[in-house]
Image (spheres, rainbow, N blue to C red):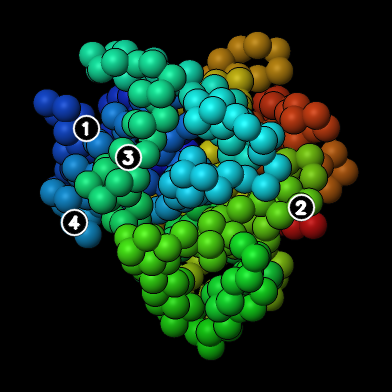
């Protein structure tokens, strides 16, 4: 059994809700303990939006060291982009940074304006105070650099991470698999932009190439070279997208409605034995979204910025099992408990309304989800009888 959570982003409360009653992993004496036979996959983005970033990184890293292959850590964009800080706080700031900023103000500006982490500096000060350390603004800067130093825990954590993980029929990446990134690996980077990719001939050779690329970039960092190709690979592009990256790709439309990969990508994944992709990175409401196309599943499990930010419990064996909670538009809160493969309606979209049959509520009816402009969402319940009369289709563009 694989137990999975993603995008904790420094929020210990999200980790606690993921662990609460979880039969596959628990917190015992301050350490993660796996049940016999369980594998734990963390989907990336350990830091930034809460005051427990260092604590979460240390917890995950300790578990990886102790359990080795039974703990898998995926590198998220919020994790990787901190590699920039060594050079940007060391005299080579971001090209858009205002001139003449002292280190604390430069770090504040960098986090807020280039890393999507407006409160991260204050969260770091709060975390330092909570652990009994001094907490001047300069101390906060020093703590980030210490994390990335040769014996720093964030550096060790990133060295233990990977970009993708395959377990049988399931492929895990942080962002997504798209026509632009499928089988493609960065081969050349100039002026901090990737200008050339190589293309693998099979899924497994691609995953191996992604791993080599990541290891080579982390080795370069260890020898004092800024890993520009890795930094570029995880960055958003000028249009806020980077569909050429498995770290940053977003499997949604412009208003946040989840979408399946194109049919030909699903077919090629199926030919390679993969019938499920699990991702984080892109918020999709309170609980995981499951999209289906025949035997294929896409699982989106990032609930950041939602009405109810919790660490949803996702477990995977021959099916996907979800335990979570959601808040409907009428303000009522409901438990979400379901297993895929047993329900023909889950993962389809209403062709007329655009609503995704996203999940099964514990009380028996369904959660319908739709992304709206300005990052709003619609979350309502519907019975099986109502859905039976609707034109449901696969959730593809």
Q: Is residue 318 left or right of residue 368?
A: left
Q: CA distance from mark 3 to mark 4?
A: 22 Å
Q: Position of residue 107 (x, y in %)?
A: 53, 32
Whichever of callouts 1 and 2 sits on the residue coming sooner in the sequence is 1
Whichever of callouts 3 and 1 sits on the residue coming sooner in the sequence is 1
Is any part of residue 204 visible from this angle? Answer: yes
- What label does residue 68 carry, if any? 4
Whichever of callouts 3 and 4 sits on the residue coming sooner in the sequence is 4
Camera-nearest residue between 388 and 168: 168
**311 in relation to 152, above or below:** above
Q: Which circle, 1 or 4, is nearer the viewer?
A: 4
Q: Element type at marker 1? A: strand
**Pointer 1: residues within 10 angstroms few (<14), some, or many (20+)?**
some
**Pointer 4: residues within 10 angstroms few (<14), some, or many (20+)?**
few
Q: How many marks?
A: 4
Q: Which circle, 3 or 1, is nearer the viewer?
A: 3
Q: Position of residue 332 (x, y in %)?
A: 61, 12
Q: Element type at marker 2? A: loop
Q: CA distance from mark 2 to mark 4?
A: 38 Å
Quarter holding residue 396 = bottom right
| Residue receiving disc 2 | 238
Q: CA distance from mark 1 to mark 4?
A: 17 Å
Whichever of callouts 3 and 2 sits on the residue coming sooner in the sequence is 3
**Pointer 2: residues within 10 angstroms few (<14), some, or many (20+)?**
few
Quarter holding residue 389 = top right
């Amino acid at each position: 059994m694989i137990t999975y959570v993603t995008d904790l982003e420094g929020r210990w409360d999200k980790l606690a809700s993921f662990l609460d009653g979880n039969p596959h992993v628990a917190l015992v004496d301050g350490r993660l303990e796996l049940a016999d036979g369980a594998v734990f996959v963390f989907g990336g983005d350990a830091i930034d939006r809460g005051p427990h970033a260092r604590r979460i990184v240390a917890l995950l890293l300790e578990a990886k060291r102790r359990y080795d292959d039974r703990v898998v850590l995926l590198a998220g964009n919020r994790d990787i982009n901190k590699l920039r800080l060594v050079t940007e706080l060391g005299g080579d700031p971001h090209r858009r940074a205002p001139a003449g900023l002292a280190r604390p103000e430069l770090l504040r500006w960098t986090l807020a304006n280039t890393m999507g982490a407006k409160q991260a500096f204050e969260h770091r000060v709060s975390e330092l105070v909570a652990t009994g350390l001094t907490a001047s603004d300069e101390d906060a800067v020093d703590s980030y650099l210490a994390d990335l130093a040769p014996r720093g825990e964030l550096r060790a954590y990133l060295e233990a991470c990977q970009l993708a993980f395959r377990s049988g029929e399931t492929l895990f990446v942080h962002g997504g698999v798209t026509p632009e990134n499928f089988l493609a690996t960065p081969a050349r980077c100039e002026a901090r932009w990737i200008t050339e990719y190589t293309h693998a001939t099979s899924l497994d050779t691609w995953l191996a190439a992604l791993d080599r690329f990541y290891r080579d970039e982390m080795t370069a960092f260890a020898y004092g070279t800024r890993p520009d190709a890795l930094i570029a690979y995880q960055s958003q592009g000028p249009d806020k997208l980077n569909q050429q990256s498995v770290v940053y790709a977003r499997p949604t439309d412009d208003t946040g409605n989840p979408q399946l990969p194109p049919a030909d990508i699903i077919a090629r994944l199926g030919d390679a034995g993969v019938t499920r992709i699990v991702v984080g990175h892109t918020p999709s409401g309170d609980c995981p979204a499951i999209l289906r196309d025949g035997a294929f599943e896409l699982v989106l499990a990032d609930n950041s910025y939602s009405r109810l930010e919790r660490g949803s419990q996702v477990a995977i064996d021959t099916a996907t099992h979800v335990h979570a909670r959601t808040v409907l538009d009428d303000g009522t809160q409901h438990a979400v408990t379901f297993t895929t493969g047993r329900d023909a309606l889950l993962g389809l979209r209403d062709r007329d309304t655009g609503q995704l049959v996203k999940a099964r509520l514990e009380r028996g009816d369904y959660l319908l989800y739709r992304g709206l402009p300005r990052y709003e969402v619609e979350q309502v319940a519907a019975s099986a009888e109502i859905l039976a009369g609707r034109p449901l289709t696969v959730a593809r563009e």
